[in-house]
Image: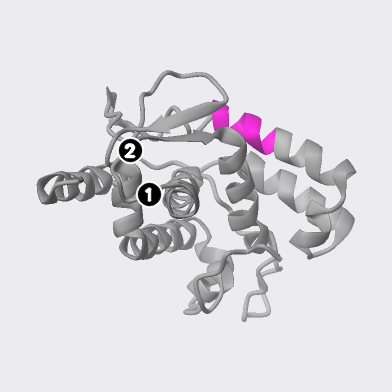
Amino acid sequence: MVTPEFQVGFLQNLQLLMSEGSIVATYKYALLLSLADISIEHGSDSGDELEIPTRWIAEKFIAYYWRQTTPFVPKGPTVEQSILLQNTGRQAAVVSKIADARAELGSSLACTRNNAQIWTPLLKQVDSTVGTMPLWKLQTVGSESFDFLYPNVGKGTSITLRPGIAACFRKFNGLIGDLVRGSWVRYVRRYNRELLGTTTDLTEFMFGSERMHLQS
C-alpha cells in the first residue's frame, strides 16, 4: 500500500527532476512519459517494484517522437519548413534516426513496425541511445544524484522502479502527462522561436488533439 505521504513526496521529487533549467534535450520528457505509460500497461497499484526492459522504453520513444518528425510548416512566408529542434545543440540523435526511417517508408508507424529491415535496427539504435543518454542522467539534479525512481546503476538492459513508484505513476498518470507534455512544448517553443513564430497550436502538432497511444 502506497501511503499518502509517499505520494506527496513522489510528486515533489518529480517536480524537482523536471526543473527546466537542468534539461538540455527533450529526452527527459520522453523518458518520464515512457515510465508513466509503461506503469499503466505493465504495473499494478500494489506498490511492488516493476522491472522495465530498456527496449520497452525505446519503443515508447519512437512512438512519441514519430509524430514530431513531421516537418513543421510555419505560417509566415519567410521561414522554410523544418523538423523541430529537440536539443540545445544539433538535432537529437533519436529524432534524426526516426526521421530517416520515415523518409524511407513514409508516415505510417505501423508499416515501419512491420518492416523488420527498418524497425529492428531503428529500435536497436534508439535503445542504445536511451541507455547511453537519458536513462542514467534523468535522476541528476545539478551535480547530485537523486535516484528515487530506480537505482542509478549506470548500465544494463533494464531498470527496476522502486517500490511504490509504478503505483504513483499509475495514480497520477493524467497529471504527469499534462505536466510533462506542457514542459516539453515550452522547451520546443524556446529553441524553435524563429520557425514557430506566433504559432498557438504547437501542442496539437506535437501530440495530437487528444492523448494518443501512437500505435498506428
Badge 1 element: loop
Measured as percent of width and height from the top left, residue 70 is found at: 70, 65
From the viewer's perspective, is 134 left or right of 7? Answer: right
Displayed quadrant of residue 107: bottom right
Q: Residue at x 35, y 55 (%)?
A: 170
Q: Amino acid at mark 1?
A: Ser
The residue positioned farthest toward the left in the image shown: 5
Work out whether residue 179 or residue 103 is closer to the camera in this orientation and state it: 179
The reply to whether residue 20 is visible in this rendering is no
Quadrant assignment for the C terminus? bottom right
Q: Is residue 175 above or below residue 2?
A: below
Displayed quadrant of residue 214: bottom right
Q: Is residue 16 above or below residue 185?
A: above
**Residue 44 tag number:** 1
Measured as percent of width and height from the top left, residue 77 is found at: 68, 79
Q: Residue at x 65, y 43 (%)?
A: 94
Q: Residues within 10 Å of mark 2 (few under 14, many from 20)?
A: some
**Residue 48 tag number:** 2
From the viewer's perspective, is 111 left or right of 29? Answer: right
Is most of the magenta stretch helix, strand or loop? helix
Magenta-drawn segment: 125-132
From the viewer's perspective, is 18 left or right of 50? Answer: left
Measured as percent of width and height from the top left, residue 202 is found at: 51, 72
Q: Does the stretch in magenta take in 128?
A: yes
Work out whether residue 128 or residue 82 is closer to the camera in this orientation and state it: 128
Work out whether residue 192 or residue 5 is closer to the camera in this orientation and state it: 5
Is disc 2 in contact with disc 1, using a CB cutoff of under 8 Å?
A: yes
Displayed quadrant of residue 50: top left
Q: Amino acid at mark 2?
A: Asp
